[in-house]
Amino acid sequence: MLSSPAVLRGLGAAVGLLLAVGSAVMGGAPGPGERALYDFTVSRLLSPLPPTGDLVLVEVDDRALAALGERWPLSRATWARAFHALEAHHPSAVVVDVLFDQPEPRDALDLGEDVLEQLRTSGLADTAEGAKLATDLEARLHARDGDARLAEAFSGLGTVLLGSMALWDHDGALPGDGDSLAPVNLPAEGLRLKAKGLTLNLAPLRLTAWGSGTLNVLVDADGVIRRYPYAVEVGGRAWPSLALATALRLWPEQSEALLRVAATDDGAPLMRLPSSDWLPRVSLADVLSAGPSSVGLDLALRQKTVFVGVTATGLHGQSTLPGQLAVPGVEIHAFALDNLRSGLVLRSTGWAALTGVLETAVLLAVLLWRRGRARTLGAVVGQAALLLVAHTAFVGWLLVDPGWVVPFLPGAVGLVLVTLAESVARTEDLQRQRDALKRLFGRSPLG
């Protein structure tokens, strides 16, 4: 019968075990019911990443926009000035969280080039005045061609890494051989993030870039980012994220180890969070105004990995990290790089998922065995409480030490359900005994 005590206890244990198996099958912890618990744990209890000494954020903040007198997006001429200014401080890499996929309007440039061509074909450029006019016009056109100036700035730096976007709704272009955006040696079919195509930067910019990577992040249904995709599958190949592409360029001798970490949890491991002040910041306004002779700016940027992106109010994404407010995408790529090089990513699949299933099964089996030896309901509740404490300690140790995220709720739910079933069974048994005693001794002498 479904109401028998053994069946109720079995159903309670089965629910807990099925939750653990379901979590493993669906991609590992945290499950939908555990996200708030996971967020509290990683943001409040797990030690954050320590401040970094070799990563710097150059941000397009509110002050930079006010100083430039421009709206977002900035003109390519302004970007060219910014990268030329960075070149003077010799950073080890400049990682750009901006997509330059469309050319700037060229109407005025095309008109000027037509006039210049007519000057030359008409023979007027052969005269002294005509030659002077043609030279002046050519210089002006050169200065106004923002895309060309930006490509020159990238070439001067030599260590610029650009971002690309993976597309889900329609096919995009795929770069050819020798492009700065190149696939990596990861099993593409198993990646958690898959797309149909890529949005690429302009060809002249890609040709002068040191490398490229995707800018996409994984956002859960509640708007919180818990996993960082180090690679995305497009066209049957694995394309690196901006963080992975940067790491492979900076530390090519560690490529095997970096790819091994990037492959964790199907290419999108859970992240350790940074402390609030872990990344030094420099406003783009200071980069443009200080000049190459600034000692303070030189100390901040020289031989550093410089991330460049927008942080101005209302201009960056509204996705959040666990326990934090909206975080600009450029910061997410920066601390994903820090996670990657340190190897301190969190794992919830593979051995971690199997451990979660086995631990839940052992936990429930111990309670089912021990409850039969307990004489009172209080003893059963005490044993369940002790097992819950041990379960909590074990899950916490796995998270802090090897970095395994094992689901907490399946074991806890199973323990509670088995205890409730035992409570119902013993209460009913006690009631039957009382009823039997009443029938035996409860008759009135006058009856």
Image (spheres, rainbow, N blue to C red):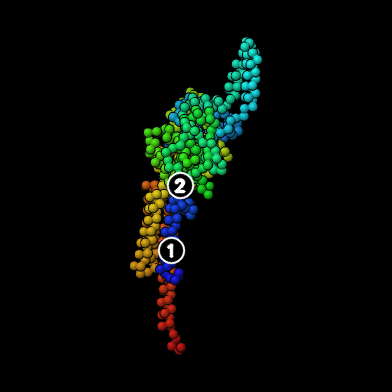
Callout count: 2
Q: Position of residue 252 (x, y in %)?
A: 39, 33
The quadrant of the picture occupied by the N terminus is bottom left
Mark 1 residue element: helix
Question: Which disc is residue 367 wearing?
Answer: none
Q: CA distance from mark 2 to mark 1?
A: 32 Å
Q: Which residue is mark 2?
A: 43
Where 288 falls versus 238 (above or below)? above
Where 352 falls versus 18 (above or below)? above
The part of the image, by quadrant, that contains residue 7 is bottom left
Q: Position of residue 300 (x, y in %)?
A: 46, 30
Q: Is residue 331 visible?
A: no
Q: Dot 2: few (<14), some (14–19), or many (≥20) neighbours within 10 Å?
A: some
The part of the image, by quadrant, that contains residue 186 is top left
Q: Position of residue 175 (x, y in %)?
A: 50, 34
Q: Residue furthest left?
A: 373
Q: Earlier in the sequence, mark 2 or mark 1?
A: 1
Task: Inspect the image, locate mark 2, and give the three-letter code of the amino acid beneath it.
Answer: Ser
Looking at the rendered image, the disc whose residue lies closer to the viewer, 2 or 1, is 1
Question: Which disc is residue 12 wearing?
Answer: 1
| Nearer to me, 375 or 159 | 159
